[in-house]
Image (spheres, rainbow, N blue to C red):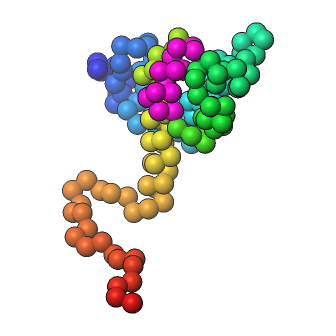
Amino acid sequence: MSKSKTRGTTSRKAGPFPMPEDWLARLRQPPPHPGVVFREQFRELQEPPISTRATAARMGISNNRLNEIELGKRSVTAETALLFEAMTGFGAESWCRMQMHYDLWHAMQAAKKNRPLIPGDPFPTTVPSTHRSGN
């Protein structure tokens, strides 16, 4: 990574616009789920649009699985990312990166609701038990 002219940012050589290192934490809305991106940007923009059933058959997966991915109810796995790459020409690593950003943003939101971990704080030595013993 190379330092950009803007203070506190780094950029990969992927594009001319460097992203701040904490760009994901600054988002107020979640990044798009990669399944939604696949549906909206690739499948539905075809002329004529390709049905979920036809796309799932071509990918060799169930219609239900593809539908859940496209609705954001199921994650894009590495296997699915390879299938998306074959369908769109858009790299599997990009699909996996989109899923990682989506998951990380949601984890960050959940962490805000809990006690934040501060670097240097010790881990708790005991974990509260939630089960009853004996009876």
Residue 68 position, x and y percent, is 63, 38
Q: Which residues are magenta?
A: 76-88
Q: Is residue 29 left or right of residue 82?
A: right
Where residue 46 sits, quadrant-wise, is: top right
Whether 79 is drawn above or below 58: the answer is: below
Q: Residue at x 37, y 58 (%)?
A: 116
> Left of 40 or right of it: where is 22?
left
Image point (46%, 27%), residue name: 79
Identity of the residue furthest to the right in this view: 48
| Majority SS type along the magenta span | helix
Q: Position of residue 105 (x, y in %)?
A: 48, 42
Quadrant placement of the C terminus: bottom left
Magenta span contains residue 84:
yes
Residue placed most toward the observer, 53 or 20: 53
* Residue 26 visible: no
Q: Identify the residue at horizontal 75%, vertical 16% (top origin).
A: 49
Between 62 and 14, which is closer to the camera in this rendering?
62
Residue 20, how many percent across, how many down? 41, 30
Q: Nearer the viewer, residue 65 or 100?
A: 65
Quadrant, the N terminus: top left
